[in-house]
Image: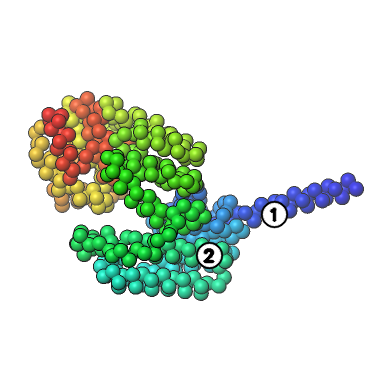
Amino acid sequence: MKRFILVVSILSILSCKNKADNNYAVISGKILNNNAQEISIWNRNRSINLKIKIDSLGTFKDTLRAEPQTLSFYDGKNYNRFYIEPNSHVQINYNADDFKNTLEFSGAGSAASNYLSLKEQRAAELMGSRVEFFSLNELSYKSKSRGIKTAMLTLLDSFSNVSELFKEMEGKDIHYEYLNNLNSYERTHQYYTKNPDFKVSEEFLSEFNGLNYTNEVDFKQSVNYKALVQNYFRNIASEKAIKDSLDRSIAYLKVISDIPNQVIKNELLFDEVVFGIKYVNDVESYYNIFRNNSTDEENNNKIEEIYNNLKHLAKGNPSPEFIGYQNYDGSTTSLSDLKGKYVYIDVWATWCGPCKAEIPFLKRVESSYHDKNIHFVSISVDKLTDKDKWIKMIEEKELTGIQLLADKDFESDFVKGYMINGIPQFILLDPNGNIVDRNAPRPSNTKLIELLDELNI
C-alpha cells in the first residue's frame, strides 16, 4: 500500500511539473553571418528583458514563462517582432546579411509570428509613400485607411493555423491601428502639406465616439490601444495645463493619477516618469505625484533610484567629470582643464537629426559670445569606430568651439553620470565646475540667451 501511495505521489509530482511546463515557451534560432554575441528579447513594458547568448555557430536558445503576447528581438543590427503563447516553441532563423529576405519563423506556434512579419510588409506596400498617404484629402485618406484595415483582416483570416486567441487579439489591434491612423492624420497632414491651419471635419473622428479608454484587457494586449489611451489623456492634460497654468509634465501626471483602473494608471505613470523625471524642472513635485499614485513596487523602486541619483545633479553640485577625451585638434581634454569659465556642453552624435538641427543656432550663439567668459564644448557620443564620420562632419559643418569624442559613447562615465539616454542634451556649468542647469535651454531656444545674460557672461 505504501508503495502504491509513493508511486501515485511521484506521478502526481510529474503531472504537476508537466502542467507547469505548459506555461512556458521556448525561443531558439540560428543566425548566419552574424557578429553579435547576444540577442535581446523584450516585451512592451520591459517586464520581459532577456539577453540570450549566441554561440560560435550562431545558435541561441532560452525558455521563459509565457502569457500570450508579442515580443521584440534585436541582435544589434536587425529588429523584428514575434508572438508567443504557453507551450509554443518559436524558432527564429535568418541570414544577417540579408535579414529582410531570409527571416523565417518555424516551430510550434510560429504561424502568428510569420503573420506579423508578412502583415508589416503588406501594410507598408498598401500605404506606399508616407508623404503621399498623409497628403491625401480627408475623404481619400479615410477610404485608403479603411482599405488597409480590411486587407489586414483578410490576411489574418487566411492564417488558419493561428490560435483563436491570437486572432481575437490581432483583430482588435488592427481596428485600433486604423483609429490611430485617423488620430494622427490632422497633425501629419499639416506637416507634409505645409498647412499648419488644416483641421479635420467634425465627422472625421466620429468612430471614436463611445470608445472606452480604460479597458485593461485591450491595454495589455494592444500597443495601438495603448497609444490611443496615451493620446487621449495627453490631450486632456494639455487643456488642464493651460486652464490651471501648470507645467505640461505635471499636468499629465495629475490627469493620469485620476484614471480609475490601477493597472493602466501604473503603467502610464511609469512610462512617463522613467524618462520625464530627468528633464522636468520641479523634480520634487513630479516625483511626489508619481509616488503617491503608483502601487507597483518594482516600478516605484526603479523611479526612487533615479530620483536619488538626480539629487547629485541638482544646481550647485559638482558636475560629473570627463577625463582625457579626444579633441578634434589632436590633443586630449578633461573637464578640469576648462575651469575658470562657464562651460556650455552639447551632447550630440553625427547620426542624430535633432542634434544637427541645432548646429546653426549653436554656431550663432558661439559667435555672439566669442571671447566671453564661457567655453562651448560639443561632446559626441558616436562610437570610436565612427571617429572618421565625426571628423568629417566637423569639417563639413565647419563646427566651432571645443569638439570632443566621448571615450565609450553612451557608456562613458560622464554620459552615464548625467543619466543621458536621449540627445541632444545641453548642460551649463559655472567656472568652478558646478552645475548651473543639467537641462540647459537649447541654442534654438531664446531662453538660453536670457540665461547667459542673467549670469553676466
Horizontal arrangement in the rendering, residue 226 relative to residue 278 (left or right):
right
Q: Which percent across, then down, holds residue 246? A: 29, 39
Can you say whether 80 is above or below 386 in the image?
below
Res. 271 visible in picture: yes
**Rendered location of residue 244, percent (x, y):** 29, 40
Q: Which label belongs to residue 168?
A: 2
Amino acid at pointer 1: Asn
Residue depicted at 34% across the width and 29% down the height: 312
- Residue at screen point 24% across, 27% down: 433
Question: Label 2 is placed on what type of residue?
Answer: Glu
Q: Is residue 315 above or below residue 365?
A: above
Residue 383 horizontal side relative to residue 301, left or right: left
- What is the CA distance from the residue labelled 2 to the residue labelled 1? 28 Å
Q: Quadrant of residue 438?
A: top left
The residue to which callout 1 is attached is 18
Q: Is residue 12 left or right of residue 5?
A: left
SS at circle 2 = helix
Q: Are marks 2 and 1 in contact (CB under 8 Å)?
A: no
Seen at 47% across and 35% down, the residue is: 301
Q: Which quarter of the figure has residue 247?
A: top left
Q: Which label sits on residue 136?
A: none
Query: Which label sits in the foreground, 2 or 1?
Result: 2
Q: Position of residue 46 (x, y in %)?
A: 47, 48
Residue at image location 85% in from the left, 48% down from the top: 5
Q: Give the mark, 2 or 1, whose residue is nearer the N terminus.
A: 1
Q: Position of residue 119 (x, y in %)?
A: 43, 68
Is 309 placed above or below 407 here? above
Question: For this rendering, which residue is in front, 398 or 148?
Answer: 148
Category of crowding for the residue at label 2, using alpha-carbon neighbours closer than 10 angstroms: few (below 14), some (14–19), many (at least 20) = few
